[in-house]
Image (cartoon, rainbow, N blue to C red):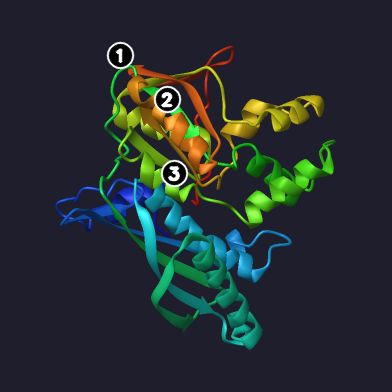
Amino acid sequence: MGRRVGEREAIGILRGAALPAPLGMYDDAHPIGCEGGFILVKQDAVAKSTDMLPGMRLDQLARKAVLAAASDISAKGGMPRWYMAAVMLPPEEATEENFAAIRDGFARASAEYGLELVAGDTGSAKELVIDVTAIGTARRFVGRAGGRDGDLVFAAGWGFGYTWLGYRVLLGGERPGLDERFVEAALRHLYEPRIPMRFGWRAAELVDATMDSSDGLATTLYELADLNGMDLELRELPLDRELEAALRAASLDGAEAALYGGEEYGIVGLVGGEAADRLRELAREEGVPLWILGEAHRAEGRPRVTLEGVGEVERRGWTHF
């Protein structure tokens, strides 16, 4: 047996197939230049053994697979428009009911976000896998790098804090001493995520650097810090006030909830101070929660992420390997 590698190293090995590495090979989605802007392409996959959470329906998993790919395009300033899907499953699970459930999940994602399923494939496998390639258009591609000294750090989306709580309930078997409405909201964010699609597309003209937050906020912030050579100095975290108060009352750590969830499908990035008010206005127009978390400053050594009153944020998050 060969040497085992982690997810980051595995991705680095596979990227070696692209020579030279094109723009976007190290980003959330790949941009292809065209007249008037870019075509953006992103592939994402879900597997039953790792992604179908307890209590989750098959149509919800199929919908989530589509939105996971579309979310990356949105985070790059694009508008997701089309997608292709490959569905693979064991022959004994190739039933009319299962295919109908997957169809319904695709249909709901399409109807909610104006997406069109244009091609696909089916095949047999040892377990259910849904592989989605999303395609979108953008007037401007917003990369992970591009931040400027003094930029503000922002986060936009609905899932921060809630997904952490949902994982504790579903995977940890916990029933925290919270009002049931918070638990229900947490499960909803995992089963039926929302993505800030129009916000990401419209924000492209305002922001300097962005990432999709799906592996946890802490990991996302450190990726931005590293790629921009910046220290990110945070004063607050993206938690809605009601959830923050409920977590505190239940003796749960709000910072842990905000930083180490995963699958938030929000947008995290850097924006110049001169554009921050317009970004806030845009978020209000689109009905998307937005937080200005702190500031970014050129790092003198290893880029760090710090939180006021806490110190350096621990770098950890979700990895597959």
Mark 3, residue position: 199
Give coordinates of residue 309: x percent, y percent: 59, 12
Q: Cα distance, mark 2 to mark 1? A: 29 Å
Residue nearer the viewer, 235 or 47: 235
Residue under the point 83% across and 44% down: 180
Asked if the residue at tag 1 contacts the one at tag 3, i.e. Cβ–Cβ closer than 8 Å, the answer is no
Give coordinates of residue 34: x percent, y percent: 17, 57
Mark 1, residue position: 300
Q: Quadrant of the N terminus?
A: bottom left
Residue under the point 31% across and 48% down: 12
Asked if the residue at tag 2 contacts the one at tag 3, i.e. Cβ–Cβ closer than 8 Å, the answer is no
For residue 277, the mark is: 2
Residue under the point 34% across and 51% down: 78
| Label 3: how many Cα within 10 Å (few below 14, some 14–19, many 20+) | many
On screen, residue 94 above or below 272: below
Query: Which of disc 2 and disc 3 is earlier in sequence?
Result: 3
Residue type, mark 3 in image: Phe
- The secondary structure type at the circle numbered 2 is helix
Q: Would residue 316 be visible to someone looking at this image?
A: no
Which is in the foreground here, disc 2 or disc 1?
Answer: 2
On screen, residue 284 above or below 58: above
- The secondary structure type at the circle numbered 1 is loop
Query: Which of disc 1 and disc 3 is earlier in sequence?
Result: 3
